[in-house]
Image (spheres, grey):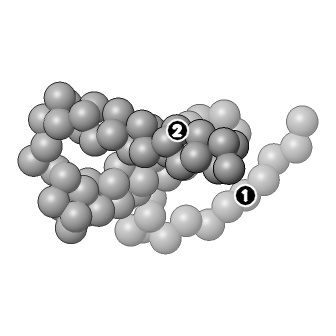
Amino acid sequence: MRTLQVTVPDVEYARLGIQDDILDFSALERLMERNRLRKMQDKCVSLAERYGISTMTMDEINAEIKEYRAEKRAKLNAKNNS
């Protein structure tokens, strides 16, 4: 096994929620993955707010999905029948 020393700015250290000065690699991976997922979630929420879908109910979302899929099937069928 090898040891890798990494310098992390205090801001990143706090943002990642690192509690210890010594981490095993899998713990560092989990912290970074959790941070990546949090950023993705924030981006999704931001996009939902920007496009006005953050207030949609699950029924409305499912109806939109069904409509999109039906349109897609209709276009594919029209293409195959021509």
Residue 80 picture location, percent across and down: 69, 43
Please give the residue where the numbered disc 2 appears in the rendered image: 73
Query: Between 72 and 28, which is closer to the camera in this rendering?
Result: 72
Residue type at mark 1: give it. Answer: Gln
> Is 49 left, or right, of 40 in this rendering?
left
Specify few, some or many for label 1: CA neighbours under 10 Å numbering under 14, 14-19, or 20 or more.
few
Q: Which residue is mark 1?
A: 5
Residue ID at (55%, 65%): 8
Residue 49's place in the image compared with 41, above or below, is below
30, 3: nearer the viewer: 30
Q: Residue 38 placed where, x, y %?
A: 38, 49
Give amino acid for label 2. Arg
Q: Reading the chain from its start, which is encountered first: label 2 or label 1?
A: 1
Outermost residue, front direction? Answer: 82
Q: Please give the name of the residue rendered at 52% of the width and 38% of the height, measured from the top-left corner.
A: 73
Disc 1 secondary structure class: loop
Question: Which of the 4 image quarters holds residue 50?
Answer: bottom left
Pair 2/1: label in front = 2
Cα–Cα span, label 2 and label 1: 54 Å
Residue 34 to residue 5: above or below: above
Against 2, is 58 above or below? above
Q: Secondary structure at mark 2?
A: helix
